[in-house]
Image (spheres, grey):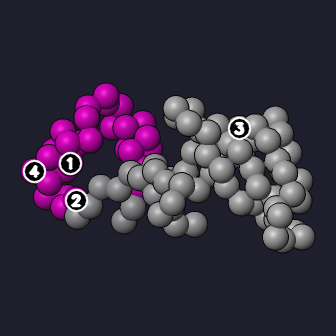
Amino acid sequence: MKFSLKWLKDHLQTEASVKEIVDTLNAIGLEVEDVEDPADRLAGFTVAKVLTAEKHPDADKLQVLTVDTGSDDPLQVVCGAPNARAGMKGVLGQPGAIV
């Protein structure tokens, strides 16, 4: 059975850590096979602000964007969204991110 940590803490009325809860459940015979953090699947994604949006020189339906991800240097990415424009914010999948 799967359930969220929030749900479990609400029903147990506890502020114990995940490790303490897992240890206690295992100690009373309720085996915990795995603990997953859904945020781990989003690790390759970040919010980026579009600084510039220019037509791609070799493609009609693509744009070349310069985006700020909060790191030191802006990134240049190719985007197929026709509504992308300077000033907007969106989700950026970093290299290696799986959708």
Question: What amino acid type should be assigned to the residue bearing mark 1?
Answer: Val
Question: What amino acid type should be assigned to the residue bearing mark 4?
Answer: Ala
Q: How busy is the neighbourhood of tag 4: few (under 14 within 10 Å), some, or many (20 plus)?
A: few
Give residue 70's mark.
Answer: none
Q: Residue at x 52, y 34 (%)?
A: 71
Q: First in sequence, mark 2 or 3: give its number.
A: 2
Give residue 27's mark.
Answer: 4
- Tell me residue 11's x, y (percent): 39, 40
Instruction: Tell whether label 4 touches label 2 (CB within 8 Å).
Output: no
- Tell me residue 40's x, y (percent): 41, 52
Task: Say whether residue 42 is left or right of residue 33.
Answer: right
* Residue 11 seen in the current view: no
* Residue 13 against residue 97 in the figure, above or below: above
Distance between the alpha carbons at the discs numbered 2 and 3: 41 Å
* Residue 10 against residue 36 in the figure, above or below: above
Q: Which residues are magenta?
A: 3-32
Q: Residue at x 51, y 60 (%)?
A: 95
In the structure shown, which secondary structural element does the residue marked by tag 1 occupy? helix
Distance between the alpha carbons at the discs numbered 2 and 4: 10 Å
Q: Which residue is mark 3?
A: 49
Tell me, yes or no, whether the highlighted magenta stretch contains residue 7.
yes
Q: How busy is the neighbourhood of tag 3: few (under 14 within 10 Å), some, or many (20 plus)?
A: many
In the structure shown, which secondary structural element does the residue marked by tag 4 occupy? helix
Q: Residue at x 44, y 44 (%)?
A: 7
Instruction: Tell whether label 1 touches label 2 (CB within 8 Å).
Output: yes
Q: First in sequence, mark 1 or 4: give its number.
A: 1
* Residue depth check, mark 1 versus mark 3: number of the one nearer the observer: 3
* Residue depth check, mark 2 versus mark 3: number of the one nearer the observer: 3
Task: Say whether residue 65 is left or right of residue 17.
Answer: right
Q: First in sequence, mark 1 or 3: give its number.
A: 1
